[in-house]
Image (cartoon, helix red, strand yellow):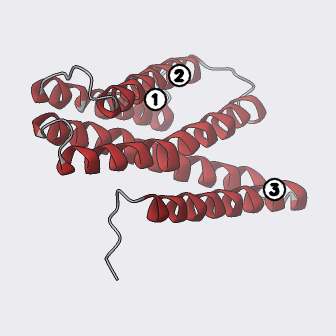
């Protein structure tokens, strides 16, 4: 009996299944809260929004670090193939669902609580659009690495690693301080 490697298909299918179950569980909890409509409904939606934001940002912070290490791996090597699997799973299983949940719940909160009013809210949404553009940029890089295409240098990915951090700091300031 041989040990399964993380690049084998079976562990990948199981990971996708577990992620699907977790996502369904998350959706079921949201649905239950929407049906029950507790007095603190807004706080529940806000909590789930923050959870999704944390998961999304964790991926946005980690994926460029993987790219930095992947840049140094020889295309086609075992190390490179492992990075491909890690990048793909991080993007598809964590980042994409978290981004979608963040957007849906965030827009719901912006509409139901704030009526899309407030300069701070408009600025926050604009920054979240930029964060989404960083996500799309990283998604394209995952496809580029997967195809063993041309790679940007590690220095580039170190710089790109800072973009989500700066955007996150500005978004948090806008949400907490509401300066305008």
Foreground mark, 2 or 3, reads 3
Q: Callout 2: helix, strand or loop?
A: helix
Q: Do callouts 2 and 1 mark residues in contact (Cβ within 8 Å)?
A: yes
Give the residue drawn at x 12%, y 38%. Answer: 74
Vertical placement of residue 56 versus 124, above or below: below
Q: Callout 3: helix, strand or loop?
A: helix
Instruction: Return the residue nearer the eye: 80 or 171.
Output: 80
Q: Is residue 104 left or right of residue 79?
A: right
Tell me the crowding category of disc 2: few under 14, some 14 to 19, or many 20 or more residues within 10 angstroms, Cα based: some
Circle number at residue 31: 3
The residue at which mark 2 appears reads as 120
The residue at which mark 1 appears reads as 174
Give the residue drawn at x 50%, y 43%. Answer: 92
Q: Is residue 18 left or right of residue 33?
A: left
Residue 170 lies in what quarter of the image?
top left
Quadrant housing the N terminus = bottom left
Counting every numbered tag in the picture gives 3
Q: Callout 1: helix, strand or loop?
A: helix
N-term mark: 3 or 1: 3
Instruction: Return the residue nearer the eye: 58 or 165.
Output: 58
Give the residue at the far bottom of this rendering. Answer: 1
- How far apart marks 3 and 1 lie (CA) works out to 29 Å
Give the residue drawn at x 64%, y 56%. Answer: 23
Query: Residue 124: image x %, image y %?
Result: 51, 24
N-term mark: 2 or 1: 2
Query: Residue 123: image x %, image y %?
Result: 51, 18
């Amino acid at each position: 009996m041989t040990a399964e490697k993380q690049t084998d298909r079976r562990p990948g299918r199981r990971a996708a299944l577990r992620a699907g179950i977790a996502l369904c569980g998350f959706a079921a909890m949201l649905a239950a809260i929407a049906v029950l409509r507790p007095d603190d409904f807004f706080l529940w939606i806000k909590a789930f929004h923050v959870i999704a934001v944390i998961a999304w940002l964790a991926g946005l912070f980690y994926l460029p670090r993987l790219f930095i290490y992947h840049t140094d791996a020889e295309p086609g090597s075992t190390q490179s193939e492992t990075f491909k699997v890690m990048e793909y799973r991080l993007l598809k299983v964590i980042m994409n669902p978290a981004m979608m949940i963040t957007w849906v719940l965030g827009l719901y909160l912006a509409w139901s609580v704030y009526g899309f009013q407030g300069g701070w809210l408009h600025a926050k949404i604009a920054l979240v659009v930029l964060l989404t553009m960083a996500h799309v940029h990283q998604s394209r890089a995952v496809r580029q690495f997967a195809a063993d295409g041309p790679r940007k240098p590690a220095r580039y990915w170190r710089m790109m690693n800072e973009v989500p951090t700066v955007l996150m700091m500005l978004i948090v300031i806008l949400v907490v301080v509401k300066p305008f």
